Image: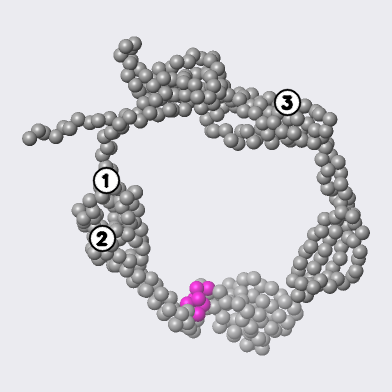
Amino acid sequence: MKKINNFNKSYITVQVDSVEGEKILNYLWNKNVSVKNIKKNNAFSITLEISVSDYLHLKEAARKVKGKIKILNRRGINFFYLKLSTRKLLIAGIAVFFIILYYFSGFVWSVDITTDKYLAPLEVRNILKSYGIMVGSKKNSIDVLKAEENLVTDIDEIMWVKVRIEGSRLTVDIVERQEPPKIKEKEYTGDLVAKKSGVINRIYTSAGTPVKVLGTVVDKGEIIVKGQEGKEGMEFSVKAEGRIYATTFYEEITQVPLSTISKRRTGNKQVRYGVNVNNNKIYLKKSLNNYTTYDKIEENWGIFIKETYYETEEVEEATNTDTVIKELENKITLNLDRGVKILDITPEVKKQDTHYEIRVLITVEEDIAESQVVVTDVEKEDESPET
């Protein structure tokens, strides 16, 4: 009785078979037993839910009316504990699993090294191994601050390093030393020329002297900004730099027939079924394909096949010049640089006896500056002290 009273928060669903089910319920209510979910199955059977601690009252009531009790369902934390007590090996296995997991979480299982350009991660990995830091090392045996200090001392290429342990992963982030810029030993001069023909709209220069004015038509290769600065008689050569925005033109011309012949389905179709055995097709019902032109669709389900024939006919369709114009526009615009600004698109369609002649002219504004660099070797004076 004391053991059953420990199941106060657990419930059972039972089926009571008796012709005097009402007497059983009255008995339970007189004993202040909480009864839930009462359901009458038939004249001789009822289903109800009670606390496990009240089961003895139900058993006594059923005995008095010579009824039978059948437990249908059990719920509650006590039943869960009861099941666990019968699965000791499972509990032990789970416990061992978490113990092993906890034990192995104390080791480093991955070393990720991030460098810049020149230092090889393999070299850093080998240095870390010499410190005793590698995959399989215990985390509590790794002093990350000392490892950072040693890496900076032992590898000259390292300017800054961060070593951190994140979970079971050791991360090493390295910033390499940057070499100071080398002294230029060559002198670069040259002009800015037009890389294509156009009408100059704007000129922006940071070095050099413009020799063309706005609105000038220039051809490919003409000098626009001369690589020269200074007053008259005191000129010196520089590398001309800047941007020259001009109106330029792109053109595409094509010829297309006045009409085209295309194939279209008429709506008629024929279907036949068969099997495919070793690439030999055997049809269940022979049917002749009387179509002159057709589309054939074949479907396979294992060895079973289905062939559908759709009758087609040739249809003459007038050429859609708008579609051709759009294709020519795309052909031009897809090859333009991002900085190009489209000003105008002018299509022109001429109908001939047997074809259309279609021309698309796109007017754009773009930077046409192209640098013509001249490299001159500069002799440097020897600055070493005389002896």
Q: Nearer the viewer, residue 351 or 151?
A: 351
Q: Nearer the viewer, residue 181 or 73?
A: 181
Residue at 56% over, 27% down = 341
Residue at 32% over, 50% down = 118
Where is residue 318 drawn, in percent x and y?
83, 36
Mark 1 and mark 2 in contact? Answer it, CB < 8 Å: no
The kind of residue on which mark 2 rests is Ile
**Mark 3 surroundings within 10 Å by alpha-carbon count, few (fewer than 14), some (14 through 19), many (20 or more):** few
In the image, 183: left or right of 241? left
Q: Secondary structure at mark 1?
A: loop
Q: CA distance from mark 1 to mark 2?
A: 18 Å
Residue at 64% over, 24% down = 344
In the image, 149: left or right of 251? left
Label whose residue precedes the other's in the sequence (1 or 2)? 2
The kind of residue on which mark 3 rests is Glu
Residue under label 1, please give it: 177
Label whose residue precedes the other's in the sequence (1 or 3)? 1
Q: CA distance from mark 3 to mark 2?
A: 71 Å
Mark 1 and mark 3 in contact? Answer it, CB < 8 Å: no
- Tell me where the magenta segment starts and ends, as one range: 76-83
Where is residue 340 drawn, in percent x and y?
55, 29
In the image, 104: left or right of 55? left
